[in-house]
Image (tube, grey):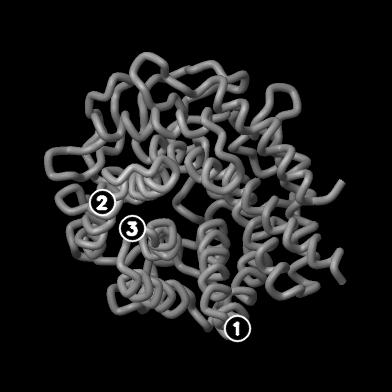
Amino acid sequence: MKYSSIYKTALLTDVLPFWEKYSIDPAHGGYFTCLDRTGKVYDTDKFVWLQGRQAWLFAMLYNTVEQNEKWLDISKAGINFLKRFGKDPQGNFYFSLTSDGQPLIQPYNIFSDCFAAMAFAQYAKAAGDGEAGKIAEKTYQNILERRDDPKGKYEKGTGTRALKNFALPMILSNLVLELEHVLPSDQVERTLDTCVDEVMGTFLKKETGLIYENVNLDGSLNDSFEGRLINPGHGLEAMWFIADIASRRKDMELLDSAKATVLRLLEYGWDDQYGGIFYFMDAKGHPPQQLEHDQKLWWVHLEALVALAKMYQLTECPKIWAWYEQVHQYTWSRFPDPEHGEWFGYLNRQGHPHLTLKGGKWKGCFHVPRALYQCWKTFETIENKNTLQ
């Protein structure tokens, strides 16, 4: 079977039906994400960033795969829930809510806003909803205003060790393209310039070839737990965002740098004893402070597959292809659940399910279906090119 067919079939006949069947809340709107192995809801709290991610996902599929009214209705359920309950009076999105929309955790995390903006922008395109487009743009501008101090009054640190974090510039490099149809073109290009400079110039260090999760405000390295933290999955996800930008701008130098970073992160992050990609690592080989550092997570391996597929499409590099086959074999032999559908999220170091849940506070309807879609479409391009040759 062609790789494109593997990904397409898994997306349309396994993963999407699981979320369509079990996650929709008919009483209050929005989605349940705390689903056990069989799809049973085990906790009804609603995490705003996962509400935005799922609303985005179904609107994106409506826009790119098929104008399936069921998909649009599912997206609308999340959009309407976020409209009614998602924001505080200042327009910042909460982190979590009760099932009926009462706020539980304050908007300390700007990523709720990022994924809400994505959702409203994609839904605006799908439904021709001008109000949703305005909410997306307003939320995006709010994110830019908070980018230098994303947690604001909710910041736990004292300021003694002020660090810049990789996550926001990484997300913005993709988010701004998601919102391109509701933003001025010059703002899109300026944001892309800034994100490329920060991702590839500030957080990627030439001396090690690694992407660091935190650096000093001047971009230098900090010799602390936070300063030595490497998250290979974050770096790999960022590199397919950068590959998209490089392809868009026909920037071969940027593409070559991203390809080299993908190879370096995989060489560094791969577990030679048991296979798979470590979750967290210390740049100097010290013990990481995260107790889950040696677990093998679903999203890390899926983002690696997307990065490798895109890099191979754009470069046809044999080393990239060898890594793709290695990661593909590991991922597809361990994460999908053949008995109950969807994918396990958390494996122990040996590659066995550590938790059998299908969703929770961090895992929702996002990384699995997004990666399946991205790989499906990327391999269609690769296979069509090979057919023509």
Residue depth check, mark 3 versus mark 2: number of the one nearer the observer = 3
Quadrant position of residue 131: top left
Q: Quick one: label 1 or label 3, which is nearer the N terminus?
A: 3
Residue 141: x and y, percent? Answer: 23, 59
Instruction: Identify residue type, mark 1.
Output: Met
Query: Which residue lies under the disc numbered 1?
Result: 252
User: Separation of disc 3 and disc 2 at Cα?
Assistant: 11 Å
User: Separation of disc 1 and disc 3 at Cα?
Assistant: 28 Å
Apparent side of residue 72 relative to residue 16 in the rendered image (left or right): left
Classify mark 2: residues with Cα within 10 Å, few (<14), some (14-19) or many (20+): many
Query: Which residue lies under the disc numbered 3?
Result: 182
Depth order, front residue of 259/264: 259
Q: Quick one: label 3 or label 2, which is nearer the N terminus?
A: 2
Instruction: Identify residue type, mark 3.
Output: Val
Apparent side of residue 342 relative to residue 219 in the rendered image (left or right): right
Q: Is residue 295 visible in the rendered structure shown here?
A: no
Circle 2: element type: helix
Residue 132: x and y, percent? Answer: 30, 44
Q: Quick one: label 2 or label 1, which is nearer the N terminus?
A: 2
User: Which residue is outermost to the left?
Assistant: 89
